[in-house]
Image (cartoon, rainbow, N blue to C red):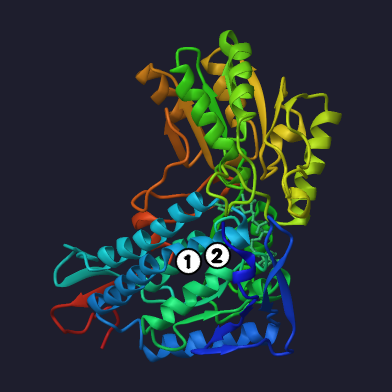
């Protein structure tokens, strides 16, 4: 276990134009360990002035060309250096992630590995052949080049503090942009460590700037400021809509990774134990605080009772506790406020008449009373109009429903405002693909749940977002496309009489 006594309270400053700074009014915010309720850090509480200073630094750095004009092999070398440093510090970073976010150490460890891999992936991508040429009418030659979008505003949530930061920072820097970055005020610890690493790697001043602070203050300034060319946001759908409206005034490009209420469809012919196993992983990994969580389980009628029995038996064995304990399988929720939101949804589920199978309460035994723990929870016999079926709870709470046939499974699966992810469990390959093709969702699995790769685009349909992270699509979000038309015979056009 991470010894709290050994960890001194951290002082998290902001990083603006290559300097570590307090906020302009010297205010700070307490940062907590959600497993113990203890204060682990004080983070500078950024102001609108701080956000403006960061935007000005990013603009100046962009216009100077200190980053965007670098040959791609040189930019790639910086990214590779950052990846190596993340690997070197992976253990320390994972422990800090667990301490601030609450996720079990093994989850945090995976996140650090993925973070380093993401920087390496984009380092490789930008050194590949790029651009297009077109054979058009003589004597013209047309070509298309990709250019950096400019100053990018990156706003991230608290559920994967390091990984969500990297999913944006790596492609934004790879594409030659400069950055103003706002981590979640709840989980600023590993994002600050990441910026220290980027500084150590020698990235020139002004290229990356980080402002801590509240979304409605710092985030809003980033989304509205005319010198920010694009904003890439991951967070709740409500906030995403607000950012889109705010960004419209200056016609910024927006990229939005939002919430979900993803269906996990289990057919009677599925490998039963595999389906139960992934259903547990789909919802309880990350304490359900995962945008793509399989928070609705749709089970074919003939195996519904059997599924519920086995799912309950397995879920009751999940070890909940402080994520720093290697035995822990599920940690706390990220904050008291969020725990209260999740508990209030459990009450809504009961009032709506869903059948509570297990859980449904805050956990306080074995030293959990100071932290923000909620038991793995499941409701059965849920119906489509229930709020616990339609709304994102973002906690360890799953709604289980029964379906009669393939058509009903598809109808129920698609019947929410969200369209982020979904999975199908069956040994019938043709049926699996038929159903997946009908799902209105951007991230899907067959006989699996959760794994995703830097190579593959991540993002949602409907109200789950606009645009994609990762893969080549993720780089596109941070680029502008320019056509260049070259006249190979420099003569007057002759359109008007001379
Ligand atoms: P929020 O939408 O509350 O916050 C996300 C970020 O936006 C935070 O940094 C927050 O700041 C900031 N913010 C809040 N209000 C504004 C505003 N008015 N203007 C600009 N920025 C603002 O989400 P949570 O942090 O609660 O994260 C959970 C949500 O994120 C879930 O709905 C989840 O589904 C979604 N998510 C989606 C993912 C995806 O890939 N699709 C991945 C991960 C999460 P502050 O620091 O004040 O909170």
The image position of residue 209, as x and y in percent, is 52, 81
The image position of residue 384, as x and y in percent, is 71, 26
The image position of residue 212, as x and y in percent, is 63, 76
Quadrant of the drawing holding the C terminus: bottom left
The correct choice, above or below, for 104 with respect to 498 in the image is: above
View quadrant of ligand 1: bottom right
Left or right? Give the position of 176 relative to 256: left
Mark 1 crowdedness (10 Å alpha carbons): few <14, some 14-19, many ≥20: some
Tell me the tag on residue 92.
Answer: 1
The reply to whether the C-beta atoms of the residues labelled 1 and 2 are less than 8 Å apart is yes
Q: Circle 2 — which element?
A: helix
Left or right? Give the position of 161 relative to 203: right
Quadrant of the drawing holding the N terminus: bottom right
Image point (47%, 90%), residue name: 60
- Report the front residue among 200 and 216: 200
Image point (36%, 88%), residue name: 65
Q: Circle 1 — which element?
A: helix
The image position of residue 447, as x and y in percent, is 42, 27
Name the outermost residue toward the top: 302
- Report the front residue among 190 and 316: 316
- Say whether residue 178 is visible: no
The correct choice, above or below, for 418 with respect to 49 in the image is: above
Tell me the tag on residue 96.
Answer: 2
Q: Quadrant of residue 474?
A: bottom left
- Report the front residue among 55 and 291: 291
Tell me the tag on residue 408.
Answer: none
Mark 2 crowdedness (10 Å alpha carbons): few <14, some 14-19, many ≥20: many
């Amino acid at each position: 276990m991470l010894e709290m006594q050994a960890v001194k309270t951290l002082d998290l400053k902001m990083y603006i134009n290559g300097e570590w700074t307090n906020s302009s009014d010297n205010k700070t915010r307490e940062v907590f360990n959600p497993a113990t309720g203890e204060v682990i850090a004080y983070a500078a509480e950024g102001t609108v002035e701080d956000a403006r200073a960061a935007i000005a630094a990013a603009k100046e750095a962009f216009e100077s060309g200190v980053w965007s004009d670098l040959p791609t092999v040189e930019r790639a070398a910086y990214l590779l250096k950052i990846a190596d440093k993340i690997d070197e510090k992976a253990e320390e970073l994972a422990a800090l992630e667990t301490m601030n976010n609450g996720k079990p150490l093994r989850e945090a460890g995976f996140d650090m590995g993925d973070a380093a891999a993401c920087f390496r992936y984009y380092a490789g991508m930008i050194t590949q052949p790029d651009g297009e040429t077109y054979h058009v009418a003589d004597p013209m030659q047309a070509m298309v080049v990709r250019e950096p979008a400019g100053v990018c505003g990156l706003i991230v949530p608290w559920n994967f503090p390091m990984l969500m930061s990297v999913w944006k920072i790596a492609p934004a820097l790879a594409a030659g942009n400069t950055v103003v970055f706002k981590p979640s005020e709840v989980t600023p610890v590993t994002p600050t460590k990441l910026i220290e690493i980027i500084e150590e790697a020698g990235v020139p001043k002004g290229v990356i700037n980080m402002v801590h602070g509240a979304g409605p203050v710092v985030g809003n300034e980033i989304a509205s400021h005319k010198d920010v060319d694009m904003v890439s946001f991951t967070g709740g759908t409500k906030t995403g809509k607000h950012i889109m409206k705010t960004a419209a005034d200056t016609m910024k490009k927006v990229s939005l990774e939002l919430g979900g209420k993803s269906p996990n469809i289990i057919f009677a012919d599925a490998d039963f134990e595999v389906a139960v196993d992934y259903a547990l992983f789909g919802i309880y990994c990350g304490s359900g605080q995962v945008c793509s969580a399989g928070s609705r389980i749709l089970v074919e009628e003939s195996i519904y009772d059997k599924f519920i029995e086995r799912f309950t038996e397995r879920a009751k064995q999940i070890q909940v506790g402080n994520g720093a304990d290697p035995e822990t399988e599920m940690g706390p929720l990220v904050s008291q406020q969020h725990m209260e939101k999740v508990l209030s949804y459990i009450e809504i589920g009961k009032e709506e008449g869903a059948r509570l199978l297990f859980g449904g309460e805050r956990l306080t035994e074995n030293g959990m009373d100071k932290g923000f723990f909620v038991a793995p929870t499941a409701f059965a016999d849920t119906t489509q109009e229930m709020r616990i079926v339609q709304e994102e709870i973002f906690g360890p709470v799953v709604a289980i429903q029964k379906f009669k046939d393939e058509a009903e499974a598809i109808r129920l699966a698609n019947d929410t405002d969200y369209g982020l992810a979904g999975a199908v469990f069956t040994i019938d390959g043709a049926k699996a693909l038929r159903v997946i093709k009908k799902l209105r969702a951007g991230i899907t699995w067959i006989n699996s749940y959760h794994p995703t790769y830097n190579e593959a685009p991540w993002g949602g349909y409907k109200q789950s977002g606009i645009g994609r992270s990762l893969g080549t699509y993720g780089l596109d979000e941070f680029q502008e496309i320019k056509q260049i038309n070259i006249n190979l015979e420099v003569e007057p056009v002759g359109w008007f009489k001379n």
